[in-house]
Image (spheres, helix red, strand yellow):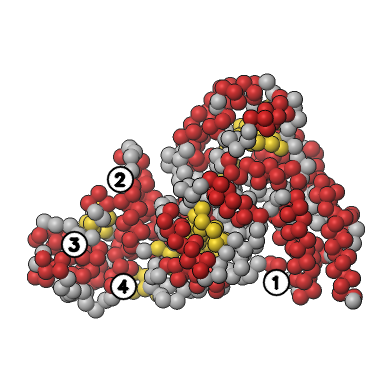
Amino acid sequence: MSDPALHALQQIFGYDAFRSEQQAIIQHLIDGGDALVLMPTGGGKSLCYQIPALVREGTGIVVSPLIALMQDQVDALTELGVKAAYLNSSQDWRVAREVEQAFINGELDLLYVAPERLLTDRCLDMLARGKIALFAIDEAHCVSQWGHDFRPEYLGLSFLAQRWPDVPRIALTATATAETRTEIAQRLGLDKAPHFVASFDRPNISYLIVEKAEVRKQLLQFIQQYHHGDCGIVYCLSRNRVEDTAAFLQSHGINALPYHAGLPSDLRAKNQNRFLREEGIVMVATIAFGMGVNKPDVRFVAHIDLPKSIEGYYQETGRAGRDGEPATAWLAYGLQDVVQLHRMVSESNGEATHLRNQARKIDAMLGLCETVTCRRQLLLDYFGQPIQPCGNCDTCLEPPETWDGTVAAQKLLSAIYRLWRECGQAFGAAHIIDILRGKETERVKSNSHQGLSVFGVGADLSINEWRSILRQLIAYKVIEVQPENYGTLSLTEHSKAVLKGDRTVMLRKDSNVKAVNTIRPQEEQLPPEAQACFERLRVWRAQTAKAHEVPPYIIFNNATLTEVALLRPATLNELGQISGIGAKKLASYGADLLACLDEYEQALVE
C-alpha cells in the first residue's frame, strides 16, 4: 500500500488500518485500474473511491442517484477537511457556476453529480475543461433491470469509458447476485474489470420475521419492547399506508415522520433533515427513502409489507446498524402480500422474461419468510455466500416446531383440483379455506360448493393455520398464485407427487410468541461512570452539530464517543489516538471536547 493512501486514512479519516479488501481496491484505482465493488452497507465503500481521489491528480467525480443526500455526504467530507462539492437541481445558477469554476480551477477533491446532470452537454463540457482523477458510480445496481431499483438514466454511463478511456472507473453497490453483477459490468463497460466481493454478512443485525395479525399494533409493540427512543425506519408498500402508520405511531408517543414521493418536496426535505440531524426519529417511508443514507445509528429497520425481492430486503435492512452496534431487522408478512405483489408484477409493463424474473424474486422472498432454518444462511446463500447458522435470527434463537402437513396439503390441493375439474373454476385463498372449513357463506351456496367432497374436510384447522399452510405450499412451489386471474390458486408440476403421497410435506408450526434477544447498543453497556460521561458528550455533540448545521454523527459517531468516555484522554495527543478522530477534527473540536471532559471530571469531584 502506498504511503499517501495510508496517510490519508489515518490523518484525514482517523482510522489506523484498512478493512477487508479496501487496501487492494484503493491501490488498484490509484494505479489506474477499473473495478466493480460489492461491499455491504456500512462496510466502508466510500473510502474505496474517496482516498484514490485524494491521492490521484485531479477531482474524483462521484455519480450519485440521490440529490437529497449529496449535501449530507459533502458536509461530512468538509468536516474532515476534504474539498468537496455537488452539482444538482437544488442549487441556483450562481452557486452552480461557482462549483463548476472551482472544478475547472482544480480546487476540488471530490464532486458529486446526479447521472441525469452528468450527461448534459454543459456538464460534459465542464468535465472536459478540468482534470478528472476517477469516476465513481455509486449504487451501481441501479443500472440493472435484474436488480431491485432499475434506473434507466444509468444506462448512459458507459459513455464515460469512451470519452475518458484513461480515467479509472469504480462501480459500487451493497447488493447484487452474480447475474446482476454480470449485467452491471456489461452495461457500464467494465467487462474486464476485477470484481471485489466482500462478505455480505452483517452479524450485528438480528433478523425477526412474524406473521401479520394486526400489523400496526405488532409494529408498535416491537418498537416499545426493543427500541423505545431509538432511531429507525419503517417501510410500507403504499403512500397511504405510510401516512396512516406514521399517524398511528405518533398517536402512541413515537416520534414518527412520513416520507414518500407524493409529499410536497419541501416537507420531504424537512422530514429527511430531521431524521438525519435529530436523535430518536422513526421515519415511515416507501422504498423511495433510504438509498445512500449515511446515518450510522439507525437501530432498527421494519417492514410492514413483504418486500419485492431479497435484494431489496437486504439493501433496506442494511441501513440499520451501520456503526456496527446491535440492530434489528423486523418484518411482518401475510398471504395477501404475496397475492398483491404478484398482481403488481402482472399489471406492470415489461418483457415476459423480466416479469418472470420479478415473480421469481417474490417467491424467493416468501421462501425466506417461511424457512425453518437459519434466515441468515438462506439470505446469504442467495448471494452465493455459504455460512454456518448465525445464532442471531429468530429461527436460530427460537427454532420453530415442524409437523407432517402432507394430509393437510393433500386436502388443499384436492380442493383446488376439484373446483377446476368439477366446476371449471379457479378461486382465491379465502374461498378455498371456507370450503375446507365447511363454512356455508353466500359465495359457497351460490356456487353450490357445499356439495363438493372436500367441503368441511379441514374443519379441524383454523383460518390462520390454513393460511400458513397455503403460504408454505406457495413457497415450496406446490401451489401457484395466478395474479392475472384475480389472485386465484392453481396446481403446479410439483402438486402431483404430494397428492399421490410420493412427497412428504413438513411444515412450520407458527408460534404466537416471537422474541429476539437483541442486545442493547454498546453505549448502554458501559460502566455507570463512563455511561454518564457518554451522555454528557452526546449533549456537547448535539450542541456543536446544531452550531455547525450538520447531523451529530458527522461531528463524531457513537463508537468514537464511547471510546472517549471509556479512556477519557487528557491531552490532544491522547485524543488523536482514538479511532475516528483525524487531524482536521482534532484541530476543529479537540480543545472543546477536552474542555467538556474537564467539566465532567470537576462535576464528579464536587
How far apart are the two marked residues, 2 and 1, measured between alpha carbons? Answer: 50 Å
- Residue 416, label in figure: 3
Image quadrant assignment for residue 502: bottom left
Q: Amino acid at mark 4?
A: Glu
SS category of the residue bearing label 2: helix
Number of numbered discs on residues: 4
Q: Position of residue 462 (x, y in %)?
A: 28, 75
Q: Position of residue 139 (x, y in %)?
A: 55, 42
Looking at marks 4 and 3 on the same chain, the residue that comes earlier in the sequence is marked by: 3
434 displayed left or right of 105 = left
The residue that mark 4 highlights is 465
Marks 3/2: CA–CA distance: 24 Å
Q: Toward the viewer: 148 or 294?
A: 294
Q: Position of residue 291 (x, y in %)?
A: 55, 47
Specify which label sits upstream in the sequence, 3 or 2: 2
Asked if residue 1 can be seen in this view, the reply is: no
Query: In the rendering, at what x and y percent does residue 2 appear?
Result: 77, 37
Q: Say which element carries label 1.
A: helix
Regarding residue 439, the answer to whether it shows in the image is yes
Marked residue nearer the N-terminal end (3 or 1):
3
Residue at x 65% of width, y 67% of height: 521
In the image, which disc is placed on residue 347?
Answer: 2
- Comparing marks 3 and 2, which lies closer to the viewer? 2
